[in-house]
Amino acid sequence: MKSFWKLFIGLFFTLLFGRFIEASIGDNTQFFQNCKRNCENNNCTKDFLIKPHAIDYFKQSMFDKLLGWTCNDECQYDCMWRTVEAFKSRKWNIPQFYGKWPFVKYLGLQEPASAIFSLMNLFSHYFLLKKFQLEVPKESPCYKLWHTFSIVCMNGWMWSTIFHARDFPTTEFLDYISAYSIVLVNLYCFFIRMLHKKSFILKGVITAGTLSFYINYCMYLKVGRFDYGFNIKLNIITGAFAGVGWLVWCFLVRKNRPYFKKIMLFYVLLALFSGLEVLDFPPLWWTFDAHALWHLSSVPLTYCIYSFVIDDCKSLYKEGLYNNEKKI
């Protein structure tokens, strides 16, 4: 047990004091800044509308208008590609702009692949929740717990879809806090699942503590300076605690609960696929970057965890019936 806590403490301090470096070259170049300034002066009015003579130049689609692409946005998008071409002509590396790779917008979507894959994750949670409701008795322990898990995840993927469709400060903030809610609810579900036989008061304390911590986290990001490094570290630390906790549980119950392999597979694949966030590269066909592929990989992982949840709830329900029969 001591080695278990040593692992936790070591991981915590490694991630806490590790350094994360962010860079964005493209939007800082003089070429991009001059292009954007000239474009806005020539084509945009003071209220961000496109001047009549520039309408044919931008050729906005119905989807562009629906998703709020202003004249300034169009200038930024156009100058981004001019800068990319300038870099390519000099055989320089593809630059990022405002912390992101250049993407070809499709149907008004700023990051089409990430937006579509996020939507796929949302639907996978919705349909698998329906499957859960059909197969698991309502009287089963943790029935409501996994509904909470599903709702939190669907909310997170909804905001991920919106953010990748159009990147605004508000959609970015909601995406980040919703993404962390998915990570945190995994840890919360682990604790409540392990303590499902314990008193209602203890579970209430854990619930209140989790909500309080999450609200403070949201307030910190909203009121203080948005710290990307801190946000990444907190996500990794929270996810690591949940992952290690579930894997230890798998080891302890491996003889009694054969379906443990499903949650173990989920975390093993999650760890492998997380490497996509590290292997950052310019998007293939200006559409599929590592982050988009990470969202795509999340879809089959959803099936792993729901398959485990359904088996676990059924098992707990049968155990409850058996124990009641023994008492009678």
Image (cartoon, grey):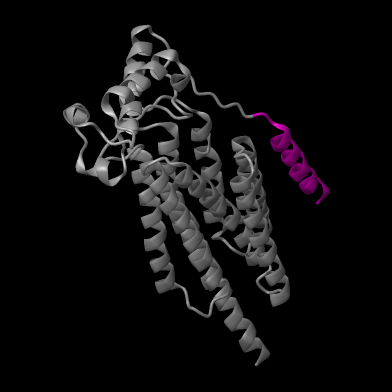
In this view, which residue lies farthest toward the bottom?
A: 328
Q: Quadrant of the C terminus?
A: bottom right
In this view, which residue lies farthest toward the right?
A: 2
Q: Is residue 2 left or right of residue 84?
A: right
- Which residue occupies 20% across, 43% down? 62
- Which residue occupies 67% across, 89% down? 327
- Which residue occupies 69% across, 36% down? 15
Q: How many marks?
A: 0
* Magenta highlight on residue 314: no
- Which residue occupies 59% across, 63% down? 257
The one of 50 and 120 positioned closer to us in this rendering = 50
- Magenta segment range? 1-19
The one of 205 and 172 positioned closer to us in this rendering = 172
Task: Using the image, determine if residue 196 lies above or below residue 171.
Answer: below
Spot occupied by residue 40 in the image (x, y as percentages of width and height):
32, 25
Q: Could one spot residue 95 in this view of the protein?
A: yes
* Magenta highlight on residue 6: yes
Q: Could one spot residue 199 in this view of the protein?
A: no
Spot occupied by residue 135 in the image (x, y as percentages of width and height):
42, 72
User: On the image, which quarter does residue 255 sit in?
Assistant: bottom right
Spot occupied by residue 154 in the image (x, y as percentages of width and height):
44, 58
Query: What kind of secondary structure does the magenta stretch mostly adopt?
Result: helix
Q: Is residue 31 left or right of residue 17?
A: left
Spot occupied by residue 23 in the image (x, y as percentages of width and height):
54, 24
The one of 97 and 324 positioned closer to us in this rendering = 97
In this view, which residue lies farthest toward the top?
A: 90
Q: Is residue 138 left or right of residue 193?
A: left
User: On the image, which quarter does residue 202 sit in?
Assistant: bottom right
Q: Is residue 12 left or right of residue 314?
A: right
